[in-house]
Every structure is written in C-alpha cells, then in structure tokens.
Amino acid sequence: MADPTPSVELPNAEYIELKNISNTTIDLLRWKIKIGNNTVSIPQSYALQPDSLVVLCSKSQWPLFNLPQKSIGLSFFPALPNEEGILSLIAPDGKTIHGIEYQSSMHENSLKSNGGWSLEMIDPAKPCSNTNLYSSQHSKGGTPGFMNTVHKKFKLSDSLYIKQCVALDSKNLLLELNQGVDSIEMSSLRLFNFDTSSIRITRAEPLPPLFSTIRLQINPALQNNFIYTVK
C-alpha cells in the first residue's frame, strides 16, 4: 500500500506484506527492507511460518491494523513513493532475496491509482514476473494480513526474452531482460549460447535488486567489426 490517501475503509497508513513461500520457518530478525536509498532493519525476532504472511508498517500506525500476531511496527518505516518505486527484501547476510518495481499505473483504473487501494501479488510462486501486481478487488481497498483477492485469478505472461545486449568491454556483456529471473537458476552457463563456438561463457551473474539484468563474462575477447548473436 504505497498511497493510502484517500482511505477507502482501511487505516490511512502505508504497509508492506511479506509472504513466506518456502517450507522453512524464517526468523525476520535483522532482515532489511530497502526503498530507494532508505534501508530499515527489522529489530525484533519474528518467526514467519511457511505459507504465512506478516504486515510491516510504521510503529505509530501499528495499532490501527489490529493485527497483533500478524504485524510488525517499525520505528523508521521507509516512506513508499506514490507513483513508483523499487522495493527490496534483504537477508541478514546482505543477499537480496526479492526485489520488485511497482508503479501506480499497474492499478486497473485511475480511481484506484489515485490512492486508497493496495497492489496485490497475483501468484506468489512467480515473484519475478513484471505482470504480477494488480489492484486489490476488496471493497475495503486491500486485505492486509489475509489472502490477496487477486490470488491466481489472472493469467501471467511467462515469456522471457533479451531486450538488449550491451558490451561493457571486450569480455563483459550486460543482458537486459523483459522481467526478473531466479538468480540461482539463471546463473547456469548452459542457458546461454553464442552463434559461434569460439566464444565461451565463463560466468553468468544476475544483478540485484530486480535480477532483470545479467552480466556475462566471456572468453576469448570479442573481435572488432564482427557481429555476434547471443541467446
């Protein structure tokens, strides 16, 4: 909920939901939320059970949600820009676990994009998809602490393609994809190839926070005045 004003029937307060889609209980102590250049750490232990969610909000507005077992109030909750922003979830070891880019234009109409309605994730199992956010369908404007109203109700685009490739230098390429990817899976060298067998890919590194760009290291170096094709 980036723009809670004017409020529909929810508290006039920004919030973020975290959902655990793993099979392991996760202690959120020292996990971090980053929005823009602002980063805030969760200062308390909270056991997020498998297939469960928790609401993060400002400590001053925490009582308004009346979700004592499903919410955490943060003293320095980062302000969420109304129009657009990149939101990152960072583990205590510094690894980016998830990043998402939201825009008010993702809402279904101008009424909802003007405030009071939350954006919900359609399919938690496909968190990297750039079509995975949509307006809440609940009459209150959102469902903090409960299942999203758009849960698996819309078809997501599964297409993945390279938008462009830039040569950073003769041995490093930067691929820009149309959407984010799983960083571990897309580190596999077998997923990429050149049209010439003389070029070997030695490293593939998806870059945080959105993992929609991948740095490729190659060997030998690219030659001048020669056209290469990478897939």
Image (cartoon, rainbow, N blue to C red):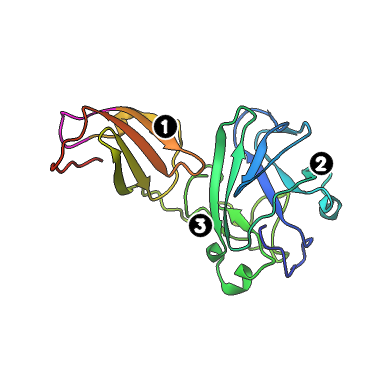
Check disc 3 and report the residue beneath it. Answer: 154
The answer to whether mark 1 and mark 2 are in CB contact below 8 A is no
* Residue drawn at the location 44% of the way across and 41% of the way down: 181
Of all residues, the one furthest to the bottom in this rendering is 111
- Which of the marked residues, 1 or 3, is nearer the chain's N terminus? 3
User: What label does residue 69 carry, if any?
Assistant: 2
On the image, the x and y values in percent for residue 139 come to 70, 66
Q: Nearer the viewer, residue 159 or 63?
A: 63
Marks 1 and 3 sit apart, C-alpha to C-alpha, by: 25 Å
Residue 92: image quadrant is: top right
Is label 2 or label 3 in front? Answer: 2
x and y, in percent, of residue 71 in the image: 78, 44
> From mark 2 to mark 3, how far is it between C-alphas?
30 Å
Which type of secondary structure does the marked residue at label 3 adopt?
loop
**Residue drawn at 47 percent across, 52 percent down:** 130
Question: What residue is rendered at 75% in x and 67% in y?
Answer: 7
Q: Which residues are magenta?
A: 194-201
Q: CA distance from mark 1 to mark 2?
A: 35 Å
Choose the circle earlier in sequence order: 1 or 2.
2
Query: Could you tell me what secondary structure mostly forms the magenta stretch?
Result: loop
Badge 1 is on which residue?
185
The amino acid at mark 3 is Phe
The correct choice, above or below, for 167 with respect to 81 in the image is above
For residue 17: magenta?
Answer: no
**Between disc 2 and disc 3, whose residue precedes?**
2
Provide residue 69's location: percent of width, then percent of height. 81, 41
